[in-house]
Amino acid sequence: MITPKLHILDNEAPEALKEAIKSNCKMQLVPPDTHRSNLAERAIQTFKSHFVSILSGVSDKFPLHLWDRLLPQTILTLNLLRQSNVNPNVSAYHYVNGPFDYNAMPLGPMGCEVQIYNGPDKRKSWEERSLDGWYLGTSPEHYRCHRIYVRKTKDERVSNTVTFKHRYITNPAVTEADIAIQAIRDLTKALKTKATEENNMGEFESLRRLEDLIANKLTESDNRKKITFAPTLPTRKDAIVYEGDPFPRVPSHEGPAYNTRQQRTYTTDMDRAMHIVEQNLATEPNINILTSINREFAHAAVLHPDTHLPMTYRQLMKHPQFRADWSHSSANEFGRLAQGIGGRIKGTDTIRFVNKTTVPPDRYKD
C-alpha cells in the first residue's frame, strides 16, 4: 500500500478537505496566484497548450463538436513528446508502454480533410469510390488503420486506405515566371564563371541585362497574376520524362521514324526550363521568354484565359463562356466513339449505350 507523505493543494481547497489530509500526511499550499508550483496544474497547462495547437491546425470545415474524438491521439502525441521524469532519455509513453511502433500505428494530422476508400461491399454499383471526411486519429486496435469521421454518413469508420488532402493547401505554388528567373540566374552564374576563365564578358552582360529586364517587369505591380502549375505534374524524385520539346536524331518532325525516336529526359523542372531558355535564345533573340515558357508548361492543361488556372472538364461544362464550345466538342467525341451524330460525325461503333433498365440486377456492380 502506498502512503503519501506530502500533499500539495491550491488555495481554493475547502477546510474540511484540509483537515482530512492533515490527519494522514503533511499538507502544503502553493503560493497565491502561482499555479505552476503545483505539478498537476502545470500538467494541465501543458495539455491545454498542446490541444489548442491541434485545434488551430484542423481544417476550416472540421466540425468542432467532434473535439472529444481527437483526445486519444492528442494524449498519445503529448506523451511521445514529453520526457519521462524517471528516465529522461526516453519519452513518457516509452517508459510506460514500451517503444512506439510508427509502422503499426501511423500518425496523421488531426482534423485534416481526407478521402476514404468506399469498398464494394458498402457502395452501390454506380456510387463514388471514395467518401469525404476528417481524420480523427490512428486506430490502436488495427494494423496501419485510421479512424475517419465520414461526412456523408455522419459516423466514424476505420480504414487502411486514406488520402490526406493537406498537401493541396500547404504546398507553395511555383509559377513559370519563378522558374524562368531561376533558370536565367543559373545560366548567368555558369556564364560568369566561363567568361572569367575565357576573358569574354559579352555573353555575361547580355544575360545580366535580360535578367534585370524580366525582374523589373515582374515587380512593376504587386497585383500581377500568378500562373500556377497544373496539379497533374509528377512528384517523383527520379527522372521525369516530358512529352514536349522532342530532341530527335533526324531533322524531320514528321513520318513514322519520328514516332520511334527517344524523347529528351529531364531530371528536374529547372533543367527543362533552362533548356527552353537556351533554345529560344539560340533561335529567336527577341522572343518573350516568359510567354514561351508558359506555353511550354501549359500544353497539357486547360487554363483559364484570365486567371491562368487549370480547369477541369466539369468546370468547363458549367462555365457560361466555354459551355457551348465544350458541349459541342465533347458530343463530337462521344459520337465518334459510338454510332455518330446525324450527318455531322461518323461513328466508329466502338461503344454502345444501353438503358439502365436493360442491365440485369446481378450485373449492377460490374
Image (cartoon, helix red, strand yellow):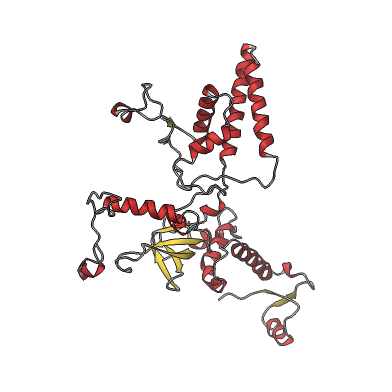
Depth check: give the residue in front, 310 or 64: 310
Q: Which quarter of the figure is the C terminus placed in?
A: bottom left
Q: Position of residue 62 (x, y in %)?
A: 54, 67
Front in this rendered view, residue 136 or 172? 172
Q: In screen coordinates, is 42 left or right of 271?
A: right
6 w.r.t. 323: above or below: below
Q: Residue at x 36, y 21 (%)?
A: 250
Question: What is the x, y in percent for residue 159?
Answer: 39, 63
Question: How many circles with numbers are drawn on the protein?
Answer: 0
Q: Residue at x 65, y 12 (%)?
A: 199
Q: Position of residue 339 (x, y in %)?
A: 24, 54
**Residue 101 in view of the camera:** no
Determine the image quadrant of residue 90.
Answer: bottom right
Residue 280 visible here? yes
Identify the residue at horizontal 56%, vertical 39% (top origin). Answer: 176
Tell me if 167 is positioned left or right of 214 in this view: left
On the rendered structure, is 132 left or right of 349? right
In the foreground, 193 or 216: 216
